Amino acid sequence: MTISIDRVFGIHEDAMRLQGRRAQLLAQNLANADTPGYKAKDIDFKAALKQAAGNSMTVPLATTQRGHIQPENSFMATEEMYRMPTQPSLDGNTVEPHVEMAEFTDNSMRYLMTLRIMSGRIKGMLSAIRGE
């Protein structure tokens, strides 16, 4: 009997990739908190994850040349959106450090939770392989 890794991890693998991408965006926002004219960006995590869940039966993109590369996960191309600030600065910067830190912390906690779920599933697979 074969074990499909995709079935074991389910949506959690995609969730970790999206959470990692979101962490990068939030870190960019924090790093550019004092950059004049910088616009804070984020992704709609729920919509991207819903798209990832529905992507299992998608048709691959048409290739006209042999060298074309198929995207590994097209849901990772989720559109980045600009955050609407409650009080933008006079220099046009829309980063609000307290909001970004709260979002970064929330995203980090969710990432750790997903990591623990995946770790538990790996441990379960290892104990099944060992016959425990």
Image (cartoon, rainbow, N blue to C red):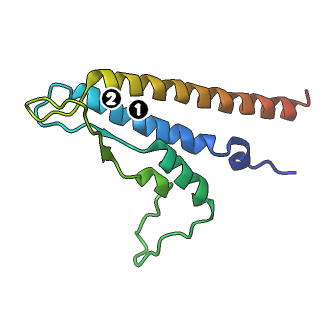
* Residue 57 position within the rendered picture, expressed as x and y whole percent measured from the top left: 62, 65
Against 65, residue 86 (above or below) is above
Q: Residue at x 40, y 76 (%)?
A: 65
Q: Nearer the viewer, residue 109 or 87?
A: 87
Residue contact between numbered discs 1 and 2, judged by CB atoms under 8 Å: yes
Q: Quadrant of the C terminus?
A: top right
User: Helix or strand or loop: what does disc 2 sit on?
Assistant: helix
- Report whether 81 appears left or right of 12: left
Residue at image mark 2 = 27
Looking at this view, name the residue that lies furthest to the bottom: 64
Q: Quadrant of residue 29?
A: top left
Q: Residue at x 40, y 28 (%)?
A: 103
Against 23, residue 56 (above or below) is below
Q: Amino acid at mark 1?
A: Ala
- Report whether 49 appears left or right of 103: right
The CA span between labels 1 and 2 is 6 Å
Against 68, residue 101 (above or below) is above
Residue at image mark 1 = 23
Against 17, residue 61 (above or below) is below
- Report whether 80 appears left or right of 56: left
Q: Residue at x 71, y 46 (%)?
A: 5
User: Helix or strand or loop: what does disc 1 sit on?
Assistant: helix
* Residue 97 position within the rendered picture, expressed as x and y whole percent measured from the top left: 27, 22
* Residue 108 position within the rendered picture, expressed as x and y whole percent measured from the top left: 48, 25
Looking at this view, name the residue that lies furthest to the right: 131
Q: Amino acid at mark 2?
A: Ala
Q: Residues within 10 Å of mark 2 (few under 14, many from 20)?
A: some
Q: Nearer the viewer, residue 1 or 97?
A: 97
* Residue 83 position within the rendered picture, expressed as x and y whole percent measured from the top left: 29, 39
Q: Residue at x 33, y 27 (%)?
A: 100
Residue 130's tag is none
Q: Residues within 10 Å of mark 1 (few under 14, many from 20)?
A: many
